[in-house]
Each structure stands twice: as structure tokens, then as C-alpha cells.
Image (spheres, rainbow, N blue to C red):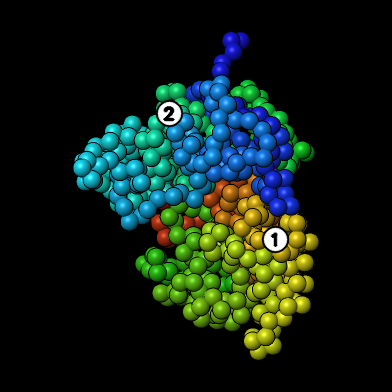
Amino acid sequence: MDFVQPLLDVSSLTKRFPGVVALDSVSLSVAPGETVAVIGENGAGKSTLMKIVAGIYQPEAGTISWNGNPVTLRSVNDAQALGISLIHQELNLAENLDVAGNVFLGREPRRAGLLQRKVMRDRTNVLLKRLRANFNADTQVERLSLGQRQLVEIAKALSLETKLLIMDEPTSSLSGGEAEVLFDVMQGLRQEGMSILYISHRLGEVKRVADRVVALRDGKNAGELQRNEINHDAMVRLMVGRDLSQVFEHRPQHPEWVVLDVVGLRTQAHPQHQIGIDLKKGEIVGMAGLVGAGRTEVLRTLFGVEPPVGGRILVNGKELRAAHPRDAIESGMALVPEDRKALGVFLPESVKWNVGLPAATYDAKAGIFLNRGAEKRHAEKAQQDLRVKTATLETLVGTLSGGNQQKVALGKWLAMRPMVLLLDEPTRGIDVGAKREIYTLMEQLAAEGMAILFASSEMEEILAMSDRVIVMHEGRQAGWLDREDLSEEAIMRLATGH
């Protein structure tokens, strides 16, 4: 086989943070027009590696070569000047600007000091046409879906004459249709000669898009897979160093006692539709549906984040007013939200503070005096029970991996032993090993009698973990499926309104 000069070649990169070796002599190369997927559990070093390549971090040791020439990337500008662009998982767009304003933000073309709006629009429309986008340069970003915003980020990268595009969990918030559009766009860019570094926990996507897979484990290279070697089990073995069953085996509890009884619930988002839910002690009920189906709105309404328009909510036979989350908490309910970074945890605070505070405050006499001893006990128990990987309880949550942040978000409520646990996308953006730990925890809590209602966009998760499934379609309750009737076809038929 003829030698192909790598576009990017990193060798023996090492990066340390206080108390942690994030990368330990990691190497990786990407050829022109090649799509390389980087996989690994949360905390494996993927994000650190990508940030070094993008010029955000600088390594303590190792070399980076671009087209065979050693380079030093001291900043994002240095990386972009070479043709390296990073699209973060949390998209970085200004919603108050139009698409053209975002694409050229900070690099607006000017003549005699005046902004050349027509030039910006024309150039942006050329890029959008290249991406087969169904919107134009004048569209306000706040009106775009997540999938369309992803295309804006790619258009921004193309405007920089990007040669290597780094994509971090690009489909984590996309619907199936939006993901398909993204894959088509990626294929077109690859055919044009662009190289792509692709990070995803969705191994089915990796198998579909990658020419080669590079696995990291504990900050080190764990192995590579060529195109013909890429399959689910092989990737899992490299990531975790052991075999994991592809489908978690759920053990139904066959409960009878209804803990949460929802009758005629109408949410602010979809006031014309009524929702009915009966959730039993020790039962796990999944909520399925396409993006925008109204699952999150139901969970937020049950928890009092958004007051209901109508209907009744009974917890353990007692009516819940649900005017405020405090009411739901006092009734024995807890919610772990989809956006853990914005709503589930306080990133600048410690593990102890995050996990211990809700229960410690609840334990405090008259709700006034904070019980520091209880705070520490709750945090220690959660760290042990959930196996939160952290150097100390004083570690800031913002420095933890996504999977460990999710465990902290769960741990702060479990210390209060709720009767009803609401989970919104409980494994979004976490790796297969951490997912299995979350599933094991859900199974354990159900066996102890906790009732769990969870919304998920991952079909395998819904099929594997649910005793029953409620399927949502455009804000309405499309139907219920018992475990023996569960199948991807049955769920999708209801989710698409058929």
C-alpha cells in the first residue's frame, strides 16, 4: 500500500491537570479525506485531545505535525489558520443574530470601515447551498432547530477554509431525520477531501461514518480498528477493556400499588392535549417519542417547573398542587433534567456541595440551619453507591466527566429517597460503561420500590429498561405499550402518528 502523508499527526501527547494525568503519551493521525472516530469512556481523554488539536490547551510533552511539518498551536487562531475547526457539543451561536452574522462573527468583511452585509449574505448562501440547507443567510438563528444550527456551525467552519473538522457528539440533541442530514453532509465533505475527527458515544453512528476508530482508555491509546474491523463488541472491548452485554437485562417487578396517578394533565406547551399516567411502586416506565413530542414538558410539569394548565396529579393517593418544585419534592418526587450542566448540577461547586446540599438542607431544623454533617454523609454515601470517580469530595463538578456529572445529578436526589424518580435523557452523552452503571442503579432502585418515569431518545434504552412505554406524538399521548408488545416498529408507528 502506498504511503499517504497524514494531514494531522500527533505523537506522544501528554497533558496534566491538578491531580490528574488527562493524556499519557497519546498518538493519533488523520489522512486527507479520512473520517477518524475517537471513542472512549467519559474521562478517557477524548475532549482533552481534541482541545489540544484545536489550540485550546497546550500539551506538556509530545509533538503535533501538519502536512509533515511540526507546528505549535498556542491558540485557537493558530489552529484555524492551519485549517482546524472544532464544533463543540454545546453549540456556540448568537441566537439574536442571523445566520450570516454568526458565520462571520468577529471576521465581518468591511470596506472603508463599513460592514459589507451583502457580501456576508452572498458568501453564507453559497456555503448553505453547498450543505443543502433549507434556510438562508437572513434567517434568525433563534428560529432554527438544533439540526439546522449544527449546519450553521459547519458553514462557519467552511468559511474558515477548514481542512480538518472536529465534531464532538454532534448528534446528541438531534432527531433521527436531522442526524441523517448531518451524515449526508459529512459524506459530501469527505468526498471533497475534508478530514473529520468524530467523537460520539453512539457506537452505531461510529460504525456508519468512520473509516478508522481510535480508542482511548484512562488517558492512553487503547487500540485502533480499521474499517472492516469496526463493530459494536470490538469497540466496547477497546473502550472498557472487557466485554459488556449490548442489551441490559431488565427484571420486571410486576407491581400493583399506584404511586403516581396523573389524570387529564394539560401542559403549557400543549394545552389542547390531556395526558394520563399511572406509575406503580417499583415500576420503570419509559417515555418515547421524536424530538419535540412533549416528553420533557410533561416531566417539567409533573415536577412543578411549569405549572399545569389543567388535570390532577396524585402522589401516593394525595393530590399534588405542583405549583413549584418544592411542592413536588415534599410529596416525594425528584427530577434529573436533560441538561445536567445548566439545570442538574452546579459546575463551579464541589461534589460534596452538589450531592449533600439538597438532603442536608431538607434535614436541617425548620429548614434554616444547614446540617454540615449530614451534607458530608450524604455525599460520601452517594460517591460510594454511585461510584463517582473523583479525587476528593471537594473536587469541582465542572472538572468531572459527563458520566460522573450525571451520577452527581442523580446522587443529590437519591439521598432524599424519593418515591417517584423522573429522569429526562438519563444517559445522554455518556459512554457505554457509565450507561450500564446508570441502568444497574435504575434496576436497583426499582427493586427497592422506587417508581421511575424516564424519557429517552435512545430506542435501545427504551426497549431494554421499560416495564411499559408511553409514546408521545406532537404533545399528545399516542398510546401505551406493555413490555411483551414492545418493538422498535410499534414505538415508531405511534411516535409518527400512525
Residue extending farthest to the front is 112
Q: Which of the two residues, 398 or 268, is positioned nearer the viewer here?
A: 398
Q: Kindly identify the amino acid type of the residue bearing the numbered disc 1.
A: Thr
Residue extending farthest to the top is 2
Which residue does the image show at 77% across and 72% down from the upper left? Answer: 377
Q: Is residue 106 above or below residue 226?
A: below
| Camera-side mark, 2 or 1 | 1
Pointer 1 residue: 395
Which residue does the image show at 62% across and 43% down from the upper left? Answer: 48
Q: Taking 171 as reference, is 157 left or right?
A: left
Label placed on residue 434: none
Which residue does the image show at 49% across and 23% down from the upper left? Answer: 33
Quarter of the image containing the N terminus?
top right
Q: Is residue 289 above or below residue 253?
A: above
**SS of the residue at dot 1?**
loop
Q: Residue 411 at what x, y percent from top left?
A: 69, 65
Of pointers 2 and 1, the one earlier in the residue sequence: 2
In the figure, residue 361 lies in which quadrant? bottom right
Q: Taking 192 as reference, is 376 left or right?
A: right
Q: Kindly identify the amino acid type of the residue bearing the numbered disc 2.
A: Leu
**SS of the residue at dot 2?**
helix
Pointer 2 residue: 189
- Marks 2 and 1 close (CB-CB < 8 Å): no
Q: Which of the two residues, 384 or 120, is positioned nearer the viewer here?
A: 120
Tally the numbered discs: 2
